[in-house]
Amino acid sequence: METRHGRLDFSRGPAVMGILNVTPDSFSDGGAYVTTEAAVRRADEMIAEGAAIIDVGGESTRPGSAAVPAEEQIRRTAPVIETIRQRHPAMVISIDTRCAAVALAALEAGADMINDVSALREDAAMAELAAGEGVPVVLMHMRGSPADMQAGGGPFYADVVREVLAFLNERVEFTTQRGVERGQIVIDPGLGFGKRMEHNLTLLRCLHRFVTTGLPVLVGASRKKFVGAATGMESPAGRLGGSLACAAVATLAGVSILRVHDVRATVEAAAMCRAISRAP
Ligand code: HH2
């Protein structure tokens, strides 16, 4: 996949996307990278550890979170993107936002792709922006909104894989009809977004069904609550082992992008999976 500043090659295993939350309240690293200096230092670190993409976000989408106004998201993310771009001319940078004004400011600051957890549903201007700018977009499945998606423990699905796939197919159709090329679209089952424990696990077990769409698949399991529930780890930072198991399962299923907090360990886990899968 070509981007403005760099090329993503998924043929040699998944690209690792390092999470950079420039937010005071993200569930795992909230408050750690709120200044531009701290955020850029963290980006440098993740790039040195083997990240192929840096995903910059100025709004937490954890369950129960409220939307952050566009101006505040821009204030948080644009200077960080601009500085990362100056320091790393060929790095692929994505902007994690549901808001077209934030995406546009990010692209102007040097970002390459749009990661929209609403799959272009929330801001009518987003599809037009992606098409006009010709940049890759990540379309993620979510049931409900961050504010209410886990209310009552999460929603019900009769067949979670089929329903998530049907949703993503519909969003791909919508996006291509608005002028975005199919080759610029990444799909994501949206682990933790309006799903119960068993739904997240079933989606992970059935990732091959997303891979067979032929579109690159992104998976974001890193340190999420269901990983803590499966491994008995209450603190997000203690969920490395569980997160690496998810990364391994995703790699073996043929996923193209792993969105993670722990870059070095994930790069190593993916390399190990690839070595195993190429064994005679
Ligand atoms: N998960 C989060 C945020 N953005 N984007 C995609 N495409 N896929 C994901 O699974 C995904 C995402 C939530 O994780 P995080 O950014 O670590 O936390 P917060 O939303 O609290 O900032």
Image (cartoon, rainbow, N blue to C red):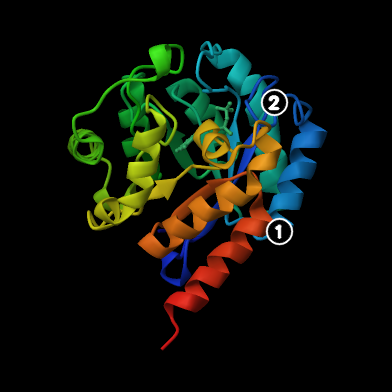
Question: CB of residue at label 2: within 8 Å of ligand 1?
Answer: yes
What residue would you read off at disc 2?
30
* Mark 1: secondary structure: loop
Q: Which mark is residue 146?
A: none
Image coords of residue 105 (percent x, y): 55, 28
Residue shown at 43% from the left, 64% from the top? 10
* Residue 4 in view of the camera: no
Q: Label 1 crowding class (10 Å Cα cut-off): few <14, some 14-19, many 20+?
A: some
Residue shown at 43% from the left, 76% from the top? 277
- Residue 115: name its quadrant: top left
Q: Where 60 sits versus 227, above or below? A: above
Image coords of residue 142 (percent x, y): 35, 27
Q: Where 129 sits versus 7, above or below? A: above
Distance Cα–Cα, label 1 vs label 2: 21 Å
* Residue 29 in view of the camera: yes
Residue in front for this viewpoint, 98 or 187:
187
Residue in front for this viewpoint, 122 or 135:
122
Image coords of residue 191 (percent x, y): 42, 36
Residue in front for this viewpoint, 6 or 14:
14
Q: Is residue 88 left or right of residue 276?
A: right
Q: Is residue 95 left or right of residue 203?
A: right
Residue type, numbered disc 2? Gly
Contact? badges 1 and 2 (CB < 8 Å): no
What residue would you read off at disc 1?
49
* Quadrant where the image shows the C terminus: bottom left
Residue type, numbered disc 1? Glu
* Mark 2: secondary structure: loop
Residue shown at 31% from the left, 38% from the top? 131
Q: Label 2 crowding class (10 Å Cα cut-off): few <14, some 14-19, many 20+?
A: some
